[in-house]
Every structure is written in C-alpha cells, then in structure tokens.
Image (cartoon, rainbow, N blue to C red):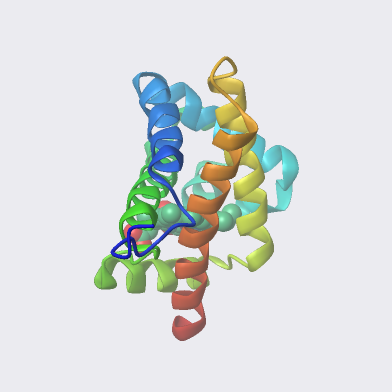
Amino acid sequence: EDPVVVNTSFSEEQEALVLSAWDAMKADSAAIALKFFLRIFEIAPAAKPMFPFLRDAGEDAPLESHPKLKAHAVTVFVMACESATQLRKTGDVKVREATLRRLGATHVKAGVADAHFEVVKTALLDTIEGAVPDIWTPEMKGAWEEAYDQLAAAIKEEMKLAA
Ligand code: HEM
C-alpha cells in the first residue's frame, strides 16, 4: 500500500462515476433540473413554500418558468461533483469557507431541516437514475450518495452555527 494515500474510502473510480453521470446529463440540465424539483415536491409537497420565488409566483405558475429553480438544482449537482473530487483528493469536504457560511445562513432562514436533505437526496438519485439509465449502477449510486452525504453534512454543520 502506498503510504501517502490519505483517503482510501472514496476512490478515483467513484469520482469518475459521479463526474461521468453529470457529464452525460449537463447538456440537458434545464429539463433535468425541472424533473429534480418536481420529484422533490412529489416526495415532500410541504417543501414548496420554502422557496420564496415559488411562493411569490403563486400556486399555479409553471415551475419551468423559474430561473432560480434551475439555478438551485444545477448548484446541487455541481457542488456534489466538486464534493466527489475533494473526497477523492483529501477525504473530506470543505466548501470554501465564505460560501459554506452563507449557505448555512440561507438554509436556516428558509426553514430547511435535516429531513429535507434526505428528500433532496432521494430526488437527486431518482433523477440521475431516470436521466442516465444505461450507465446507472449500484456503484454509481453509492458514489453519488457518499458525495452528497458529505456535502450535506458540511452544510448542516454550518447551519448549526448559523442557527
Ligand atoms: C438556496 C445549495 C439543499 C432549499 C441555496 C443556494 C445554494 C444552495 C447555492 C443559494 C443561496 C446562497 O447562495 O446562499 C444547496 C445544496 C444543497 C441544498 C448544495 C444540498 C447538498 C437544500 C435543501 C433544501 C434547500 C435540502 C430544502 C428542501 C433552499 C432554499 C433556498 C436555497 C429554500 C433559498 C432560495 C431563494 O431564496 O431563492 N441552496 N442547497 N436546499 N436552498 Fe439549497
């Protein structure tokens, strides 16, 4: 075994599984972002009024017309990819300090709780499976779960400090 390897729990293969899925999805990111959100609200309808831009637009406004919704969805995908790369390199997730602190405060203010992170995780995995069914494997699922869980843990930690 190479003694300079800091992290053996998240491998190069796992990083590649995360990045390859996003690579296959990103050309269609607008449609995928919409599906991701629809899935979140299917699992947890109560999460909808948390998003001020949805609340302000009114009950019947079509979801696809919200640019901020796409932005949030794409951010979750992109940050999970960055998290995979950091996990492989350092074994830990550290979103840039300023960013993470802001994210903690934003989510506390929006009323996001631990359970919502589980909902978003399930919706994320379902969305990827639906988007790239031919490359989806249990290994790919495991790699995304790990990348997301570590990212969510870093945000939740920051939320505790902001609360
Ligand atoms: C806002 C990322 C999970 C609800 C944001 C913002 C980012 C972000 C980057 C923009 C605000 C800012 O920059 O301060 C993430 C990531 C997540 C995650 C990476 C998971 C790993 C969640 C969950 C919920 C949620 C679980 C609740 C269902 C919101 C809401 C806002 C927000 C309501 C404010 C939107 C607005 O005011 O326009 N999130 N988020 N997020 N997020 Fe998340």
Task: Using residue 95 as the reference point, say whether residue 63 is left or right of it.
Answer: right
Is the residue 40 above or below the residue 22 in the image? below
Q: Position of residue 92 (x, y in %)?
A: 39, 65
Q: Nearer the viewer, residue 110 or 149?
A: 149
Q: Nearer the viewer, residue 10 or 57?
A: 10
Answer yes or no: is residue 62 visible. Answer: no
The residue shown at (61%, 48%) is 121
Q: Quadrant of the N terminus?
A: bottom left
Is the residue 105 above or below the residue 129 in the image? below
The residue shown at (58%, 36%) is 139
Task: Using residue 107 as the reference point, say whether residue 114 is left or right of it.
Answer: right
The residue shown at (69%, 62%) is 115
Q: Nearer the viewer, residue 128 or 51?
A: 128
The residue shown at (46%, 59%) is 151
Task: Using residue 125 as the reference point, say whether residue 53 is left or right of it.
Answer: left
The quadrant in which residue 73 appears is: top left
The quadrant in which residue 36 appears is: top right
Q: Position of residue 154 (x, y in %)?
A: 45, 69
Q: Position of residue 41 (x, y in %)?
A: 67, 41
